[in-house]
Structure formats: C-alpha cells, structure tokens
Amino acid sequence: MSTAYVSGRVPARYERLVAKQARSARTSKSDLVARYIIEKSLETEFPGISFRDSRSGREAYLTGHRVAVWEVLAVREETKSVERTADHFRWPRVLVMRALAYAKAFPEEIGRSREGETDTAPFAG
C-alpha cells in the first residue's frame, strides 16, 4: 500500500496523551496517529461504523453494538435479505445497510476480519 505524509500540530497536553496511549498500545506515536486519522475519516464517511481491537487486529463494527461488520455480512449472505438480516439482529434496516455499505467499500478488510475471527486452528499458545 502506498502511503502519504500528513502533518499537524496539537497542544502539548494532547501530544502527551497520544504518547501515553502509544506506549500502552506498544506502537509509535506516528503509527497511532495514522490509525486515528484513518479511523476517524472512515467513521465520518460511514456513519454508524466504529473500530475496535479484535483477535484479527482492528475491526469495523456497528457503533453501540457488539456485532462486527463481517458478522452482518455473513447473516445477509445466509438470509439473502436485508429485512431478514435486520430481523435477525432486531435492528432497524438502516443499521444493516450501513454495515453492508462499509463491507462493499472494503471487501478485503472485511474478508481478513472474518477469516481471522472464524479461524478454527487450535491455539498454539
């Protein structure tokens, strides 16, 4: 993936907060800020989508719910219907549509999340 440089200035107190969070996440400030920019941009572009840590890394899910986008897609593939998918989750149809819009825009990411979360290989820890 090609990358581009983005720069910005923040008050010192926020830089200290980012530095603390980067240490906790065991990553660099630069990588953490890049993740924040990317995720906030995606959350703005796709209302109702947020991100969380999962077994497969960072994962898109429905804001306010414990359901990942890949899970909504899997139910939609099974039911073959947005309405039945919404009924399955007991959600308004719009939430299903938001998840499906994100899945359509980022199929590789959703596929990796799905594969990482449904991997049935035994734990080698």
Image: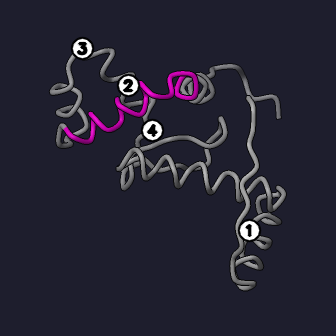
Q: Please state which amino acid type lies under the numbered disc 4.
A: Ala
Task: Indicate yes or no whether the magenta region holds residue 95.
Answer: yes
Q: Secondary structure at mark 1?
A: helix
Q: CA distance from mark 1 to mark 4?
A: 24 Å
Percent position (x, y) of residue 38?
60, 48
Q: Mark 1 or mark 3: which comes first in sequence?
A: 1
Marks 4 and 1: in contact by CB < 8 Å?
no
Marks 4 and 3: in contact by CB < 8 Å?
no
Give the quarter of the image for residue 33.
bottom right
> Which is the main secondary structure of the residues drawn in magenta?
helix
Q: Is residue 78 left or right of residue 117?
A: left
Q: Is residue 55 left or right of residue 77?
A: right
Q: State whether residue 59 is above or below residue 13.
A: above
The residue under label 1 is 21
| Span shown in magenta | 94-111
Marks 2 and 4: in contact by CB < 8 Å?
no
The residue under label 4 is 68
Q: Please state which amino acid type lies under the numbered disc 1.
A: Gln
Using a 10 Å C-alpha cutoff, classify the residue at mark 2 as few (fewer than 14 neighbours), some (14 to 19) or many (20 or more): many
Using a 10 Å C-alpha cutoff, classify the residue at mark 3 as few (fewer than 14 neighbours), some (14 to 19) or many (20 or more): few
Using a 10 Å C-alpha cutoff, classify the residue at mark 4 as few (fewer than 14 neighbours), some (14 to 19) or many (20 or more): many
Q: Please state which amino acid type lies under the numbered disc 3.
A: Lys
The residue under label 2 is 73
Q: Which residue occupies 57% across, 30% down?
A: 113
Q: Please state which amino acid type lies under the numbered disc 2.
A: Leu
Q: CA distance from mark 3 to mark 4?
A: 18 Å
Q: Secondary structure at mark 4?
A: loop
**Foreground tag (1 vs 4):** 1
Residue 80 numbered mark, or none:
3
